[in-house]
Image (cartoon, rainbow, N blue to C red):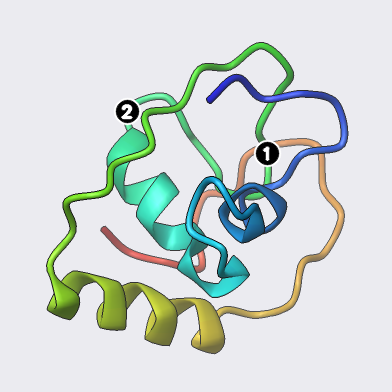
Amino acid sequence: YFVVKGDSLWKISGKSNIYNDSFKWPLIYKANKSIIEDPDLIYPRQKFEIRQNFSDEEIEDAVAKAKETEPYRPHTEPRKSLPIKY
């Protein structure tokens, strides 16, 4: 998936051709953490791998983590402490 302006992991994972569930955004982060420094800061033209082979346990964990994550607060610099651990 190529990121376009206005995208967020939440929006991408909610797309019907991705996961059709915005709460699964941590799966995108988990699969691409080598190129995503902060899950709130993604940029146009980044290329993300969209894995489909997660176990049920991994999916449940991702959704639970998404639901526990604090709401988005605007920032422009990567945070030193991320809201989610993988």
Q: Residues within 10 Å of mark 2 (few under 14, many from 20)?
A: few
Quarter-wise, where is residue 67 in the image?
bottom right
The residue depicted at 43 percent of the width and 60 percent of the height is: 26
Numbered label attached to residue 14: none
Pinpoint residue 9: horizontal percent, then vertical percent. Answer: 61, 50
Does 44 sit left or right of 82 as displayed?
right
Report if residue 33 is visible in the image: no
Question: Which residue is painted at 82% across and 64% down in the image?
Answer: 73
Q: Answer whether residue 83 is visible to the viewer in this image.
A: yes
Residue 58: which quarter of the image?
Answer: bottom left
Name the amino acid, label 1: Leu
Label whose residue precedes the other's in the sequence (1 or 2): 2
Q: How many marks?
A: 2
The crowding category of the residue bearing disc 1, from other C-alpha atoms within 10 Å (few below 14, some 14 to 19, many at least 20), is some
> Taking 77 as reference, is 29 left or right?
left
Q: Position of residue 71 (x, y in %)?
A: 74, 77
33 and 20: which is toward the camera:
20
39 w.r.t. 55: above or below: above
**In screen coordinates, is 31 left or right of 50?**
left
83 displayed left or right of 54: right
* Residue at 71% from the left image edge and 46% from the top image edge: 8
Comparing 12 with 77, the one in front is 12
Q: In this rendering, is residue 43 above or below 41?
A: above
Distance from Cα at disc 1 to Cα at disc 2: 13 Å
Q: Secondary structure at mark 1?
A: loop
Between 77 and 45, the one lying in front of the other is 45
What label sits on residue 41 in the rendered view? 1
* Residue in the picture at 47% in, 67% down: 24
Q: Farthest residue in the front direction?
A: 17
Residue hosting label 2: 34
Q: Position of residue 82 (x, y in %)?
A: 49, 59
Q: Where residue 74 sits: x, y (%)? A: 87, 55
